[in-house]
Amino acid sequence: MKVRPGDSVSDSAAGRPAATRSMFAPLAARGFRRYYLGQTASAFGDSLTPLAIAFAVLHLTASPVDLGIVVLSTRLPVILLTLLGGAIGDRFSRRTVMLLADLTRFAAHGTTALLLLTGTAHLWMLVALQLVAGAGSAFFNPAAVGLVASLAGKEHLQAANSLISLSRSAASMVALGTAGALVALVGPGWAILVDALTFLVSMAFLYRLPTEERLSADKAVPRTGGGGLLAGIGGGIAEVARRPWLWIWIVHVAIINAIVLSPIMVLGPYVADRQLGGAPAWSAIGIAYAVGGLAGGFVGARWRPARPMVAALLFALLMAPLPALLAVPAEVWLLALAGVGAGMQVVVYNVLQTTAIQRNLPERFVARATSVTMLGALVAAPLGTGLAGPAAAWLGTRPVLVASAVTAVLVTALTLLAPSVWRIRAESS
């Protein structure tokens, strides 16, 4: 039996309810299935590199300052080039842009692995190569959001975005253990080499998109007339500014990232080290967060709220318990439960936001609107990370974490007062 939008009865032949079938319906499209398999492999590789590159730097220089420089080098190009990546993703073939971005990242990570395996790496080389890899991500990510809409079809967008989030969460959980084993047994260079090879897998699946899907992806966005890429960037920003619901959403994400999520990432390990028994406690909370992400993927795939923006904002309230309990601090099992909620809300929020952009904006603006959304989050996160430590030193860890919890509730409540938030409705099936 074929999967049809609107099915509500059980499929006796398949032996599973219609909600489950609709969750996997995007995989019936050959183009999306190939894209999904390639990105699952790539997500596994992406989750290997942060741990591997961290230990590579520490083995090389044993300097936390040097580690901070390398980490910044992976993020800085994304911040600086994301708007340009969005403009290019809306002007040219998204498939081609993504292939070139994957090729760039393969070259950067492959070279990094080679330098580490041969013992010829220097810090400046790692920084330069991470800058190149970050640039590839800046061009890949906005184009990918637009390509998913072409491959999955409007009726399956939310399920497609949820499946992608599910695979990322699952790949991350597996990769964290794999990365630790590879680094401990054979060294960080091998883990980064595996990541490089996953970009080749992604490229192979992108290249093999069926002909009709390839043409659809290439023609989905006509070239904009005149003005060049700078005008394209300006046009994307203008499209976002014209939609109060979207820029309000971007502001909400930026505040949550800067004042809620960043202090958790900085002060959580500090609290765990001082009062919860050290790294095992923080690791348990991190695993619970990943489990919450998996659960969020299932929720996002099967739940169709009538007002998706309202639903996403209500889910954002699940972020508040984690900083509040860290401020106490509560028992690890309670913090782990809060971590499950926090991980779930991130995925559900992102799935509903991405789907709303894909459904409510003209396709020729999807990549650019996505890049503006990403930029708000990307700029806010390092800003909050940089300020969390000094704020805790000045005010104390507990007041900063309490302020984070209160901010999550107040900012979300204020955002829900905006009329435009309530006007965004899901498309009827």
Image (spheres, grey):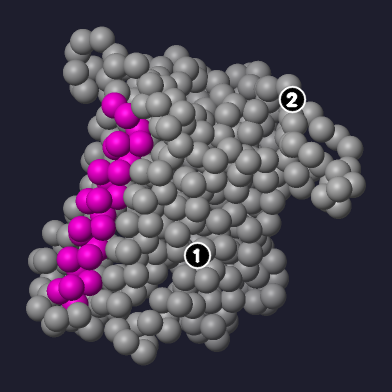
Range of magenta residues: 92-116
Q: Is residue 26 above or below residue 155?
A: below
Q: Residues within 10 Å of mark 2 (few under 14, many from 20)?
A: few
Q: Position of residue 388 (x, y in %)?
A: 40, 59
Q: Position of residue 18 (x, y in %)?
A: 81, 41
Task: Say if the magenta span includes residue 95.
Answer: yes
Residue 155 x, y percent position in the rendering:
65, 28
Front one among 113 and 356? 113
Q: Which mark is residue 429?
A: 2
Q: Which residue is at 29% across, 84% downward?
A: 187
Of residues 172 and 254, the one nearer the viewer is 172
For residue 322, what is the image quadrant?
bottom right
- Magenta stretch mostly in which secondary structure? helix
Residue 22, can we see it? yes
Residue 355 included in the magenta stretch of the image: no
Reading the image, the residue beneath label 1 is 172
- Image quadrant where one finds the C terminus: top right
The residue under the point 45% across, 21% down is: 363
Q: Nearer the viewer, residue 212 or 8?
A: 212
Check disc 1: other Cα within 10 Å, few if <14, some if 14-19, many if 20+: many
Q: Quadrant of residue 376?
A: top left
Which comes sooner in the sequence, label 1 or label 2? Answer: 1
Q: Residue at x 44, y 52 (%)?
A: 38
Q: Kindly tell me whether residue 86 is visible in this rendering.
A: no
The local secondary structure at tag 1 comes to helix
> Of helix, strand and loop, which one carries label 2?
loop
Question: Identity of the amino acid at label 2?
Answer: Ser
Q: Nearer the viewer, mark 1 or mark 2?
A: 2
